[in-house]
Amino acid sequence: MKPNVIVALLVGLLLGFVGGRAFTGSSKDSAGSNKPTAAANAAAPSGKPADATIFKVPIDDSPTKGSADALVTLVEFSDYQCPFCSRANATVEQLQKDYGSKLRVVMKQNPLSFHPRAKPAAVAALAAGEQGKYWEYHGKLFANAKALEDKDLESYAQDVGLDISRWKADLTNPKFSTIIDRDQALAGKLGANGTPAFFINGRFLSGAQPIGNFKTIIDEELGKAEALVRSGTPANQVYAAILAKGVESAPRNNPSQPEAPAQAYRKVDFPADAPSFGPKDAKVTIVEWSDFECPFCGRVGPTLKQIKETYPKDVRVVFRHQPLPFHPNAKPAAEASMAAHEQGKFWEYHDKLFANQRALDRASLEKYAQELGLDVARFKAALDSGKFRAKVEADSSAGAAVGANGTPTFFVNGREFVGAQPFESFKRIIEDEKARAEKLLASGTKPDALYARLIEEGLKSNGAAAAPSEPAVQNIEVGNAPVTGAKNAAVTIVAFSDFECPFCGRVVPTLHQLEQEYKGKIRVAFKNQPLPMHPNAKPAAEAALAAHEQGKFWEYHDKLFANQRALDRASLEKYAQELGLDVARFKAALDSGKFTAQVTADMAEASRVGVTGTPSFFINGRSLVGAQPIDAFKRVIDEELKKKGTVAADQK
């Protein structure tokens, strides 16, 4: 996921406006104001090119918001327990504001099997629709995606003013299950197997993508629709006219996401003892970052087996761990797989885990070890001692450093390749890389030095290849965000962060070191991006701003990151007391929700600039994603300082 990934796009109703004014990029106090803005203004939104294929996506009797005369219809397949869907919901709401009567939104239900509360929530929303309150209830569910128990669902029904007796009776109506089954069958037929998935006038867009990616397709479709209207098609028949020539279903091997083009090369290393299959001197090395509890990672297993069978002498696959924080059993499973690796049975254990993704508790992990004939006592001792914890964490950090923050993410001879793509998609990039390797071997490169040379040559090619698609420089206002460093610093770093995110915690020492090494030359502004799968992140963000009000944001910031596992209300108050804050004033700020709007505004701005995960940084408006090594920050900072020096010289 990066799909996603990825996907960026968090809850917030003010995606285009903060503090009552539009994001025009005109403020002088902004991250991007240290950069010329012409290139940014001219740049197209970043993201994958959209597929022009039109799919026939019926509206049926699905919940609909917007006019029948709308020239663009957006059909969404969603899951109320999916955190990515929650993020995308904010984008859809903003699109409705931006396009008004030109956009109609249709909601289809696709509660995924590994989200146990998603289907009850979908039924509850459809039952609310019987009383004309689907969309109000829909909004409640996405605003409270971590609280979907029966009592919560009833509470939301009361909140939106439903007749509770009638609503409860409707919950047992079998027609809602029939609707959900129909929607899910349609999703499968169209190749929309993950959530969220969108069809814009029949064109597929997968994942919680930046709003600019949606707007690119919507604007294209608006142009086509307006042409139809000018030629005599009534507005309320435009959707049917567009779909008339569409396809009924996706190709059999169509991935759950549009195929991603191969990206620029990265320097991707791996430990010599990392689990792998294939020859060490293979022409193509695929490094995978994966999570045993991630359903998309599980889907790619058969593809990897096909790669092994098709390219036994030419491809090596290396496995690295990226257990995501919202998968509670992923990290123990990763450590267990390394304990199996120690006994020579990593891949057998790997297959066991993916075949049993819903049973990854400690007892099950031991059971799989026994079934594979491992020395169970030795296996259990490894888990009890945390013997492989450091290896798993090192993999995770290395993944974040190269941008593998979602799973599965692959690097094929250093080229990023994201998602559970079909074999044919892998085959194309493997063949490209195999040909590149054969040229190097023919020119005298030794087989044992091939991978390093492939990476080296790939990195050299990045300059020309990456230049046309370099992301736009973002003009990000610092506004009232907490700031440390010189006000007139040549370089501004705006961080979008989450106090409960482990990757955000890892980058704190890096930022401290940068502040020391570039004293007077950089300033750091902090903006909040509490992710929906972190229940304590938003309260912690508000608490940090309450500390900021009393002049101690950065001290409180450090407290929170030093205690990421203790961010409940009592702990937040305890940290305030330890720092000598006026605790009564601090508590009053939290109780009143005084800083809720500021946190929401930060989240909205993150969505506007395409932030898909945390931590994300903008260095003079230039994006740098993840808990990257300090050298990655220094490279961009030094380039920006050099530009400032050049500008100063030109002005003399």
Image (cartoon, rainbow, N blue to C red):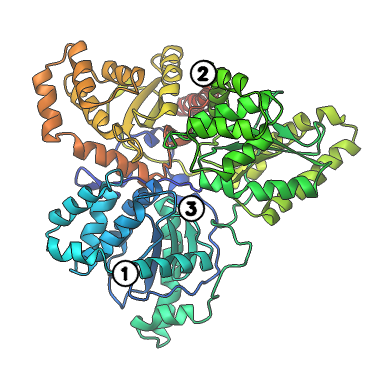
Q: Is residue 552 left or right of residue 304?
A: left
Q: Position of residue 246 (x, y in %)?
A: 53, 76
User: What residue did someone put label 2 on?
Assistant: 384
The residue under the point 25% across, 20% down is 553
Residue type for callout 2: Asp
Report the side of 280 relative to 607 (left or right). Answer: right
| Outermost residue to the bottom | 232
Screen quadrant of the C terminus? top left
According to the image, label 3 marks what residue? 44
Depicted 118 relative to depicted 471: above or below = below
N-term mark: 2 or 1: 1
Callout 1: SS? helix
Q: Is residue 185 above or below residue 527?
A: below
Q: Is residue 47 visible?
A: yes
Q: Are marks 3 and 2 in contact (CB under 8 Å)?
A: no
Label 1 environment density (alpha carbons within 10 Å; few <14, some 14–19, many ≥20): few
Q: Nearer the viewer, mark 1 or mark 3?
A: 1
- Secondary structure under tag 2 reads helix
Q: CA distance from mark 2 to mark 1?
A: 48 Å
Is 531 left, or right, of 440 in this rendering? left
Q: Name which residue type carries label 1.
A: Pro
Determine which residue is flagged by label 1: 174
Give residue 190's mark.
Answer: none
Marks 1 and 3, how far apart at CA:
47 Å
- Displayed quadrant of residue 231: bottom left
